[in-house]
Structure formats: C-alpha cells, structure tokens
Image (cartoon, grey):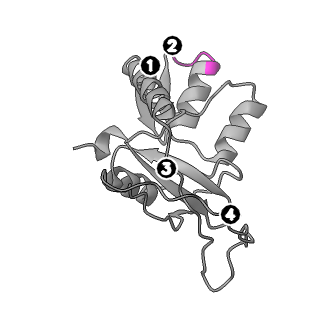
C-alpha cells in the first residue's frame, strides 16, 4: 500500500488516498475514478508531500523544536498548489487498514463489477427488473445523489480499487 496526499482542483480540498502502487493511482486518476470526499469532483491531483525518510539506526532522534504554524492558502489561479507535510502512519493504523483491505476484498469476491453502468444496474435491481445481487462499480457524485433521492441505498467503498480491466 502507498498513501498519497491528494487535492481536488475545484475546491482545493486535501485528503489521503491509499493505493496498491503508484501505477494504480495513475490508472485510477486517468480513468476519473478518484473523487474528492468533500465536493465529489474527480479533478484530483497529488498534493506536494515531504518524503518520510527515517533516521539511520546509529543516529539519535533530535529534540523537536516548535515552529510557527504555516498559513494555509487555497490554490491560486496560476496553478500553485498547497503544500503539506505527510506524517508517518502508526503501525496500528497500518494494521487496521490492512484488515479493512482484506475485508473489502472478501466482500468484493461476492460482488459483480459493473463499472460505469453502476447507476443503471442499481436502479434495475431496486425496481425489480433484475434479480437482487451485490454489485460494485463507479458513479459520479450526481449519480449517487439521484440514486439516494430515489430511495436506492448505495455506499462508497472504503478503499479505492483497480477496475478488473485495468489489472495486469
């Protein structure tokens, strides 16, 4: 697993994305599968991150000094992006995400990938035009809102996935 700090171009919202590899991120980003959890836009880029480099085993950890908090700015029109400092993920969180990934994978084994046809397939199942079956795929924020307005229960997957056709 690799964690990227991401930012949406529309609202400048920053969030984390967990991916199997850098290639998985690029594939999902190019396919428009990564949505901002705040506003739903899928115009998402990597935010600037400082590398998380550990100290050598024979070095001591320096005492931390307090630094003034940096003023957060939203992206400017000329394309500047906000910067962030990624913090190390504690081992217990990594373990929890690993368990979540295993649970999601087990759940998806029982579910059929329908890709971008998800909204139509969900409607067909809801209205009895197709037999009830677990499905998963992609939907825009607008599609999800319409499904919810129709009383169709949907939920986002907790972790991103690579569509079957993009897997090698």
> Which circle's residue, 2 or 3, is located before the other in the chain?
3
- Which is more foreground, mark 2 or mark 4? 4
- Over which residues does the magenta segment extend? 126-130
- Which is more foreground, mark 4 or mark 1? 4
> Which circle's residue, 4 or 1, is located before the other in the chain?
4
- The label on residue 39 is none
- Which is more foreground, mark 4 or mark 3? 4
- The label on residue 131 is 2
In contact (CB < 8 Å): disc 2 and disc 4: no
Residue sitting at x 44%, y 23%: 99
- The label on residue 66 is 4
Mark 3 surroundings: few (<14), some (14-19) or many (≥20) residues within 10 A? many
Q: Main secondary structure of the magenta part?
A: loop
Mark 1 surroundings: few (<14), some (14-19) or many (≥20) residues within 10 A? few
Q: Is residue 119 left or right of residue 94?
A: right
- Residue tagged 1: 107
The quadrant in which residue 23 appears is bottom left
- Residue tagged 3: 33
């Amino acid at each position: 697993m690799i964690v990227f700090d991401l930012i949406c171009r529309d609202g400048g919202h920053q969030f984390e994305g967990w991916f199997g590899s850098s290639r998985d991120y690029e594939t999902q980003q190019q396919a428009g599968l990564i949505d901002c959890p705040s506003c739903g836009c899928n115009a998402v880029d990597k935010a600037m991150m400082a590398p998380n480099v550990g100290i050598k085993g024979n070095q001591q950890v320096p005492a931390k000094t307090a630094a003034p908090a940096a003023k957060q700015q939203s992206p400017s029109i000329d394309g500047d992006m906000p910067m962030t400092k990624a913090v190390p993920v504690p081992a217990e969180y990594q373990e929890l995400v690993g368990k979540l990934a295993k649970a999601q994978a087990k759940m998806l084994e029982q579910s059929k990938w329908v890709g971008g046809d998800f909204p139509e397939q969900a409607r067909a199942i809801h209205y009895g035009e197709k037999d009830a079956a677990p499905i998963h795929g992609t939907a825009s924020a607008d599609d999800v809102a319409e499904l919810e307005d129709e009383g169709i229960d949907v939920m986002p997957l907790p972790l991103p996935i690579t569509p079957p056709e993009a897997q090698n």
